[in-house]
Structures are given as C-alpha cells and as structure tokens.
Image (tube, helix red, strand yellow):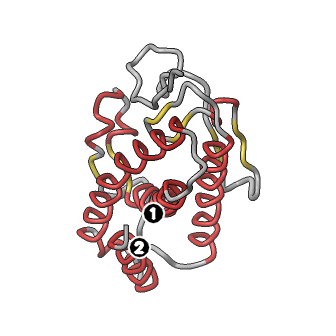
C-alpha cells in the first residue's frame, strides 16, 4: 500500500499555492461569509499541500477564516491600536519566509496584518495539535498536520516577538490582547 505524504511543493506544480486558485477567503466587509475552493480539502496554509483530500483540511480552512472574521469584528468594536495608528503608515515586519514570492506586500506586513496572523495561527496551531492527538487520522492527514504544525510554530513565535517590540502602536486594550496571545504562544 502506497501512502502519500504532504510536502512543500515547488513553484509551478499543480498545487502551487502561489499560482493556483484561492484556498479560502473572508472579508470583514462581508461578516459571516467565507469562500473556499476544492483546494481547501488539500491545502493547509501557508505551504502544506496534500495529494489526498481531507474534510479535516477543509475544517481548518473554515476555522482560519472564521478566526479572521472574529478578529476583524473585535478590532472594529474595540480600540486595539494606539491613537493615530494607520495601516498606511504602519512600521513593517519582515516576513522572511515569504521573501521568494516576489510581492512586497507578502514580504513586509503592517502591524495589524501581523496581529491578525499571530492570532489566527495561534488558534490553528491549537487545532493542529488537537488533530495530531487523534487516533483515527490517516497517515497522510497526520503527516500534513505535523508539517503544518512544525512550520507554523516558529512563524508564530517570530511574529509574537516582533509585535511585542512594536507595543507602542497598541492601545492599553491591545497590550492586554498581546499579553493573552503571548500566553497562548508560550503554551504551544
């Protein structure tokens, strides 16, 4: 019996995450709306792609977008960033693992974008860890979740450190949120 294993795919391949259709998407202007493609059953963002589909990968993509929606709603309803904070003038955090994509927006993130990513990936890493504790995963699902967890953990730790260095751009409530996210990060 042959077992397919999740891998990081080279540019130009069928499941290349940079050139193929979107996996999942949400927009704060459309609350409770999440769009996803068939690819969401194969892809755990940012880089884990499985040759075999799984409803568990779709579940992660729905959690991913739902968490973005929740964070967007919280930011709109609460003062998370300091007075005068603007996405347009925000300091940028270098995202070294995206350097090869060739798009500056993907290589340098504004504080609010990095905050979103840190919060989302904290939740996703918890989900992945929970899934890895299951006894009923296929070998491919287990390998995919392991690859996604192992790739996500250093990224979320890096983002957390960078956000803490830029704490002056957060409101007192935002600083409390950062402390909560730090605690969640430390528990991973």
Q: Residue at x 56, y 70 (%)?
A: 75
Give the labeled residue for mark 2: 184
Q: Which mark is residue 92?
A: none
In this view, the residue in front, 114 or 132, is 132
Q: SS of the residue at dot 1? A: helix
User: Is 154 positioned to the left or the right of 31 in the image?
Assistant: left
Residue nearer the viewer, 157 or 172: 157
| Above or below 63: residue 21 | above
Q: Can you say whether 104 is above or below 27 in the image?
A: above
- At horizontal 52% and vertical 61% (from top left) the residue drawn is 130
Whether label 1 touches label 2, CB < 8 Å = yes
Rendering quarter of residue 12: top left
Q: Return the residue at label 1.
A: 122
Q: Quadrant of the N terminus?
A: top right
Give the answer, above or below, for where 122 lies relative to 40: below
Q: CA distance from mark 1 to mark 2?
A: 7 Å
Residue 146's place in the image compared with 128, above or below, is above
Within-10-Å neighbours for mark 1: few <14, some 14–19, many 20+? many
């Amino acid at each position: 019996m042959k077992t397919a294993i999740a891998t990081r795919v080279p540019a130009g391949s069928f499941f290349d995450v940079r050139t193929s259709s979107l996996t999942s998407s949400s927009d704060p202007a459309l609350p409770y709306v999440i769009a996803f493609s068939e690819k969401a059953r194969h892809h755990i963002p940012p880089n884990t792609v499985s040759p075999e589909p799984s409803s568990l990968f779709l579940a992660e993509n729905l959690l991913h977008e739902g968490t973005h929606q929740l964070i967007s709603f919280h930011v709109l309803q609460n003062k998370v960033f300091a007075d005068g904070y603007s996405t347009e003038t925000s300091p940028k955090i270098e995202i070294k693992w995206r350097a090869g994509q060739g798009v500056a927006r993907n290589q340098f993130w504004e504080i609010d974008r990095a905050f979103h990513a840190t919060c989302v990936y904290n939740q996703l890493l918890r989900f992945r860890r929970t899934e890895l504790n299951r006894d009923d995963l296929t070998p491919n699902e287990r390998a995919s979740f392991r690859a996604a967890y192992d790739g996500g953990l250093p990224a979320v730790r890096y983002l957390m450190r960078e956000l803490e260095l830029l704490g002056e751009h957060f409101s007192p409530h935002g600083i409390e949120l950062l402390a909560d996210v730090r605690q969640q990060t430390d528990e991973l």
